[in-house]
Amino acid sequence: KMVLAQVVYQGKNDSEDSGLRFATCQLLWKQINSETEKIQEELNKQLFDNLIHFLRQSHSELQTKKTEWMCRMKSSEIPTAALVLGVNVTDHDMTFKSLSEVLQDNVTPYVVSLQAKECPGIKHLLQKLMGQLMDCNVDVDSSEEEECVNISQKKIRCSMASLSKWYESVTKKTDSETPSKKRTSSSRHWQSPPIVVIFKDMESFTTKVLQDFIVISSQHIREFPLVLIFGIATSPMIIHRLLPHSVSSLLCIELFQSLSCKEHLATVIDKLLLTTQFPFKLSEKVLQVLINIFLYHDFSVQNFIKGFQLSIVEHFYSQPLSVLCCQLLEAKKRVNSLSHNQCENIRSLPSFRRYVESQVSEKQIALLTEDSFLKEVTQTLLEDLHIYHENYFTVLRCLHVFTTSLPKYPLGKQIRELHCACLGKSVWETEEYESAIQLLRMLAKDELVAILQKCAEIFISSSGKQFSNTVEKLEEFLARFQNLEETSEVQDVSVSSQKELQKTTDLYHLQKTLLALKESKRSKKLTKFEMLRFEVVDFIDSLVRSYLAPAEMQTLNEVVYFNTANTLREHLNAAPRIALHTALNNPYCYLKNQTLKSDVGCISNTAPDICIVYKLHLECGRLINLVDWLEAFSTVVTAVEGTDPDAVATDQVDEIIHARFIRAVSELELLGFIKPSKQKTDHVARLTWGGC
Amino acid sequence: MPNFEHPEYPEATLLHLESMVPCRESQVSSLLSIFGEVARSILCIWVDYRCSTKMFVLTNRLKTNLNLPHVFVNCVECFTSRLLLEEILTQLQSLSSEKKHGSHVPCDTFNDFVRLFKQEIITQDLQNQTVYIVLDKAEQLREMEANVLPGFLRLQEMTDRNVTVIFLSEIVWELFRPNTGCLEPFTLYFSDYSIGNLQKILSHYHPPEYSADFYAAYINILLGVFYTVCRDLKELRHLAALNFTKYCEPVVRGEANERDTRRLWKNIESHLKKAMQTVYLREISSSQWERIQKDDGEPGHLKGLSAHAHVELPYYSKFLLIAAYLASYNPARTDKRFFLKHHGKIKKTNFLKKHEKTSNHLLGPKPFPLDRLLAILYSIVDNKVAPTANIFSQITSLVTLQLLTLVGHDDQLDGPKYKCTVSLDFIRAIARFRLKKVYYDTYNTPKIT
């Protein structure tokens, strides 16, 4: 955070409110972060509740039925929860952290999480297990601390037997405690709480360790209630792959599945981006970058949120006017205290310039010269922007209800796709929108009514008052559909013609009547329902055209929209190979030295040695002759220095040049472009392909 | 009259013993005869047992019933030699003394063990008795230090005390025999229970509320279904307990009486078959199975573990996996043909080499270098793929998910090699495009005429 502060302060001089910007950025991120945590909690709630229920049940079975015949006959299996979390491994840590917190709060203090890399052998596993258990005992009651240290010192040898002894002593202790002494924390837990062992990454554990652990602990399952949780990233089949039947028959495995990461992302986008709650917005391209990274690379919601955070920081850092990116009332206040410099910043915004050009000339002059007038206008423009957003999201949701009912989803199934389509350009000019409208015109009545009802609900629940007319209109449509139903006229014409069809027996007449029927259908006037349907679709179309205008068209959109997608892509989806190639091929790009500016293709004289060597090697095949290479290098370098051509003519290469060459070549080898080859003497092998 | 006869033990004990370990008459009597000879002790006994027929229960019961001083240790649990030796000593301490757990004795080497063992025998006053050490899952001893197994084999010699070591193992002695210091143990084989034996043993533990005959009929049906797949007594007993309530249902409801075997059979048979496909394979858990029975619902709505085989992967991960699969199962020679647009003509006759005619699937995945993986990836993805850091980290995460494996050491940075470990079905499920076009084995499958 300190670093962040420095970065923002250094960014622009203080006349551009960098301090305030930093504070705003911090506050905004704090709000967003707490919102994401809330979302996470809600999404995990169902899963965790199920798990706790499972723990409770597995536990009670061990307790109650000890005397029954059934229980004696049944082999005592270790209750095991197979928790399928999906392939987005980076998100799992968060889930496990909150899981063990929830378990520790509600079920048992004895929660152990194990990672495969900590447990290469059964010994390490048990060490880790017991270490964590003894520690958590200290947490339960700090007065026992001294005793605990003694115990753990005694038990340097970690075996299951000592673990069960430990469990016995611990539970006895809590039982013997008088109720008055009992702390609140222990009363929340169940009596004889289970020991929960979480295997965070099931796939990475070695078969032997898992098998041994399960076999050992199954022998002690009667002594203390043990519950295993397997964190699985791929599919539960991995259990069968890792464990033979003789071992898996010791387990009582139940499956739990977390929400899919795509649904998770949809919720996050819905709660963070498609809302007016937070003033900060992402432009279409930036959002597309973040979504692409998610869908193409990692499926990680955490990374998505990290990317979102980065865009916030980047926006507040690079855009001086981001100081206005806060709640509307606050922003209006801040407008008044803007410096002259900042006013100039506003004037240079492309969207503001567009706005100025559309005004009458007196007003133009006033806007460009008078700061106070500019501030006044800015306030109203900010308010307009706010209203635009309020309308935008409501209408977007409404349009989404329509488009999800269409076959093949021309505008995308997810609301985020629709959002991207609307953000970037005028959606009504696209082909997809055209075909969607076409399809809407063919909706069946009951579908259409259901959709209209949903839309009405969306409009009613939206805070904006400006939609009261729209709601009225929608309700009117609904009423008219209702009326249609009541006065549904039987289409006499068609019925009678069908009767005719049945009557006619002779082929000629049949053909004639069929033709006549076809003709009548073509020229037939639209039914009342069809008319109404057209009206509805036109109404929706008008809503879209008036409210879903792209954000770029809005004046002052630069204040709240972050749109430098390139920076974000460079940071989040780095391409080291390409960066390396650019650095070596075009050193000017990074060094910014005017002398290095050169045409593509020719080898610059003043470039660093490694760049020259690199460029020369691009022209070679798979095997590179070192002598030829050296010669070429020497030619290029000496040409630079403009030495005597006679000296070059001699075969002897200057020692210094030779040394420089060798150093450059070994640098290339270090970077992994070449490696020594044994196929031919004095040759090196190229490890990359492609080039100039 | 009991089946075993032994002069030293009273008849009642022997009878009790027989009821405890049914169907093991010959083995028990030979064990008894060995145990009986207190003075002239046998050195080591090697007991083979297959299918974990609760052998250790048997010997354990023998010991406790006959009041022999013994130590029982599980070698899986004591995974280092030190733990093992200390455990034996600790148990030895508590043999005769009153306290339940002996104090901890530090013992690092086998030498210490022999010394401490001798001391302990004297303090416990066991010189005139044979002490038995039972080592369960003895195959684990092979993984400890080289001197442990020979040490135990010659324990009597080294301690000069009456001590018998019993090794219990599922593996035959021949696979154990150490190179040096070996003393051939006396080997005793325990054969599998026959179906008759199983029937007898399982019926022995009938529930108190029902008659033995009724339960025996049930066991008969149960064995009819399960005997072909499972002969493990413990597992069978578990299954019998799980499904018994369902069997009793008609009787409880009064629709059939206990002797109406035909009706009871009809009621239970399909149920048991379902159990074989689900709960026996641990596709669903025992408690879930019980819940289904209680609710009388169909297990259809409850999918087993295998039903969730589909794995959702990010876009490029899918293609990486497909590329890895192709690289693993296609010969590198054929890449040009499959992945280049203008590969020129390839002579049909030369295309298939003789040794490549066996299906690549029978040979398993072959390792391939990273470069080849990327080259195939670039060729199968329609649009351009930038070699970003994310792509490389995706390869690594596929390795952690065990969908690819890294061949060789993971510290080798230069030209790592991978293998693809997923099955054809898995790839088919994630590959939307026609795999056939670029998949060598389809050219290679024998024609059916």
Image (tube, grey):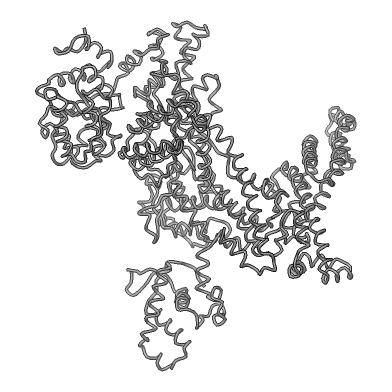
Q: Is residue A496 visible?
A: no
Of B364 and A200, which appears nearest the observer?
A200
Q: Where is residue B287 in the image (x, y as percent from the top left)?
A: 48, 25
Res A316 → quadrant: bottom right
Q: Identify the residue at horizontal 15%, vertical 39% (top origin).
A: B111
Res B312 → quadrant: top right
Q: In this view, does B252 lie above or below A579?
A: above
Of A559 and B325, which appears nearest the observer?
A559
Of B31 and A59, which appears nearest the observer?
A59
Farthest residue, direction front? A180
- Horizontal side of residue A532 vs A92, given as left or right: right
Res A22 → quadrant: bottom right
- Horizontal side of residue A262 vs B44, given as left or right: right
Q: Where is residue B86 in the image (x, y as percent from the top left)?
A: 24, 35
Of B187 and A317, which appears nearest the observer?
A317
Count up the numbered dots.
0
Q: Identify the residue at horizontal 36%, vertical 29% (top origin).
A: A220
Q: Where is residue A422 in the image (x, y as percent from the top left)?
A: 73, 53
Q: Identify the residue at horizontal 80%, vertical 66% (top origin).
A: A354
Q: Position of residue B215 (x, y in %)?
A: 40, 11
- Horizontal side of residue A538 vs A577, given as left or right: right
* Quadrant (top left/top right/bottom left/bottom right) for the N terminus of chain A: bottom right
Q: In this view, does A20 lie above or below A601?
A: above
Q: Is residue A396 visible?
A: yes
Q: In this view, does A678 lie above or below A471?
A: below
